[in-house]
Amino acid sequence: MKKRIAILGSTGSIGTQTLDVVRRHPDRYEIYAISAHRSVDLLVAQAREFHPEVVCIADESKYAQLRAALSDMEIKVWAGAEAIAQMVTMPSIDVVVAAMVGYAGLQPTIEAIKAGKTIALANKETLVVAGEIICELAQQYHAPIIPVDSEHSAIFQSLVGEDRSEIEKILLTASGGPFRTFTLDQMRSVKAADALKHPNWEMGAKITIDSATMMNKGFEVIEAKWLFGVPVEKIQVLVHPQSIVHSAVQFTDGAIKAQLGAPDMRLPIQYALSFPERLASDFPRADLLQLGNLTFEKPDMDRFPNLALAYEAMSRGGNIPCVLNAANEVVNLAFREDRCGFLQMSEIIAETMHRAPFIARPSYEEYVATDREARETASRCLEGRGV
Ligand code: MG
């Protein structure tokens, strides 16, 4: 039996790499449904190659164009956020790859969990925003969540055959991003284009900026907390510029297990689809002899305050990580559009976090309201400052 796969965000970096994995294993996987935010042309090309049952576009203004382009094929064409949420519950789907960018991934992921699907989770914002609800629902509906994020895949792989109560510490590695060695003065004038020359991983624009500010790592600390049930005090970030050790787990007897490899997202994507099996691949290998040295250093929270803000958000808990995410989405976009300076991003996130009313145990509706209000606050802070 082939596994039937739905991909949310099929035209993004994770989406296209997931399709590449599927392309290599036509005997094992079949694409049943794909959705994209607004990239019609690529979505059409993917539909023509993989012949899914359903194709969905989030941006409803693109519906007519998509429908016309696929009118000669027997494919259901849908549009809008509601349609995407409905698509993931279709009975034939086995695995939902959640690879949408940002907060938009939350609702369809919740629907997929409620439908009992296996979730290959690439959208970390889902756990940052509403980790508690997601974990409770996953347990209630017996929906396994398998991480796609390379660090969490490494931790997941290190935990195979282990008892989670024997985890002493998680060692979460970070490349440090393109500004790892910059002074604060140099960071003041960097632009999005400088950050988009990221050294190690090929990623989408939003996560590349998050990686440059280390917010991505802050999110990953929160993601690890929810995925592995480990308090954030036991999650240590190590800057490891070579990106070969993808993360590690230290156990109560002092043993450390890590997963290493070349930085290529297709490996963790493939593992999430094939788990508990491993499939042969011709992905690039990490040649340890050629690499020679692997180095590790402590992250600098003065130059990268986003990491400290993420720890703070998690220790305050409740709706504060949701505020952190919403403010970050606002400033990340503003920075990419040259409406916000690099260092201003953290200042605005901190200000938004301190202004937000605290809710200890938010309902889904309260998360939605928190998200909206935090976006408004961050936008006002942004306007008040100017670039
Ligand atoms: Mg990662």
Image (tube, rainbow, N blue to C red):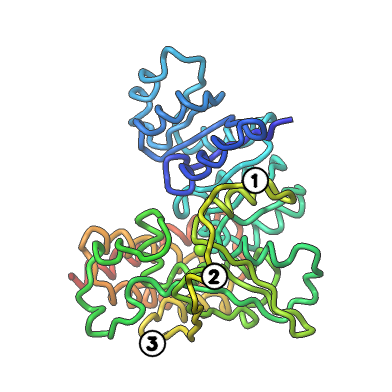
**Where does residue 137 sit, x and y in percent of width and height?**
70, 53
Q: Amino acid at mark 1?
A: Leu
Q: Which of the two discs, 2 and 3, labels the residue nearer the N terminus?
A: 2
Task: Name which of mark 3 and mark 1 comes first in the sequence.
Answer: 1
Q: Which residue is mark 3?
A: 302
Rendered view: 189 above or below 39: below
Q: Nearer the viewer, residue 25 or 301?
A: 25
User: Marks 1 and 3: in contact by CB < 8 Å?
Assistant: no
**Quick one: SS at disc 2?**
helix
Measuring from the top left, give residue 347's x and y in whole percent. Answer: 33, 78
Spatial CA distance of label 3 from label 1 is: 39 Å
> Image quarter for residue 80?
top left
- What amino acid is found at the position of numbered circle 3 in the picture? Asp
Question: Which residue is the site of mark 1?
Answer: 273
Q: Nearer the viewer, residue 235 or 2?
A: 2
How many numbered marks, from 0 up?
3
Residue at left offset 62%, top offset 56%: 147
Would you name the residue on which mark 2 appears? 288
Q: Secondary structure at mark 1?
A: helix
Which quarter of the rendering shows the N terminus? Answer: top right
Element on which disc 3 rests = loop
Q: Which mark is residue 238?
A: none
Q: Is residue 386 left or right of residue 133?
A: left
Q: Nearer the viewer, residue 307 or 15?
A: 15
Q: Are marks 2 and 3 in contact (CB under 8 Å)?
A: no
